[in-house]
Image: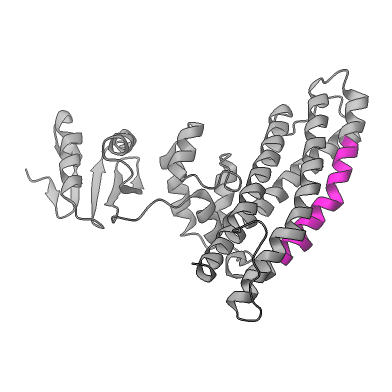
Amino acid sequence: MQTVTENILNVTLLEPRQKHPTIFIRFDELAEGESLTIHNDHDPKPLYYQLLGERGNIFEWEYLEQGPEWWKVKISKRISGENDETLGQIAAKDLCKAQIFKKYGLDFCCGGKKTVKEACKEKGLDVTKIEQELQQADKIPAARPLPYNDWGLDFLADYIVNTHHSYVRKNLPDIKVYAEKVMRVHGNRHAALLHICQLAEEVYTEMMAHMVKEERVLFPYIKELVAAKNNTQPLHTAHFGTVQNPINMMEMEHEMVGKNLAEIRGLTNNYTLPQDACASYSLLYRMLDEFEEDLHLHVHLENNILFPKAVEIEKQLIP
């Protein structure tokens, strides 16, 4: 019986030992950009990992139907030169997808240079499930987020200062004070509070110095790049060399602060309050949780939008 009709393969009609070899043959015969749809009576997820292991990241996997009787999967061969987008690039284009990354603990800001497959492998997550949710997000109408990726870099830099830097300066001193207060009152019963207090102090020290460097050095230079591109003023030679040098430093500092906050989240079991928590204890956890939420967007706007675009503008101006 013929099992292949155009680009559809019903693998239930094949002997078990013939299934995967036949699928691999059919996949190898595909031209770049073409696809094969397989029909099966169970989830062919093991095939995904075998295909990834033996052929590499040269395909896209899309569930068209998922049971209870039929599983239909469209497997497309990538076009040469097309690479997976990184978490940061995906989030820059569609911040709604960042919510999926946050749901699974995938760092799209400090760790935004990894692909979805790489990030899932590191954390032992089911990449097919997460890729499916990302595909579904494209089909669901959502409220229009702020168009960060469309803004001019001079405007975006000012927005970061006026929104996120202002938030940090307003809230981080209070977090530091409450971390010390809660540690003094409850530290004898909850030993982790001492380490949380130390981490909060490190975040405070790092962020306060970090923002000054951005506001006095990096952001003014990025604005000069924009002005030079728009031919409104000449570009002066920067004392730090290329813009990539201060960007490297800022990204390293972002990563340090992100790791500290992730460690705090782990120490607090995702900000789960103990039974003897007082109002200050509760307030501290809420402020830390909100601060980390703001920092994710703050770092995303810089690492994934502002910084890469500044590098590209400088390359255009200084080949």
Q: Position of residue 81 (x, y in %)?
A: 32, 56
Identify the image quadrant of residue 184.
top right
Q: Position of residue 280 (x, y in %)?
A: 90, 36
Q: Position of residue 37 (x, y in %)?
A: 24, 50
Identify the image quadrant of residue 275.
top right
Identify the image quadrant of residue 205.
top right
Any magenta on residue 123?
no
Any magenta on residue 177?
yes
At x 89%, y 30%, the residue is 182
Tell me: 200 left or right of 317. right
Quarter of the N terminus within the rendering: top left
At x 26%, y 58%, the residue is 33
Tell me: 27 left or right of 216. left
- Given residues 292 and 232, the one toward you in this image is 232
- Given residues 16 and 306, the one toward you in this image is 306
Main secondary structure found in the magenta portion: helix
- Given residues 181 and 155, the one toward you in this image is 155
Where are the magenta residues, as a range? 157-178
**The residue positioned farthest toward the top in the image shown:** 188
Q: Position of residue 47 (x, y in %)?
A: 29, 36
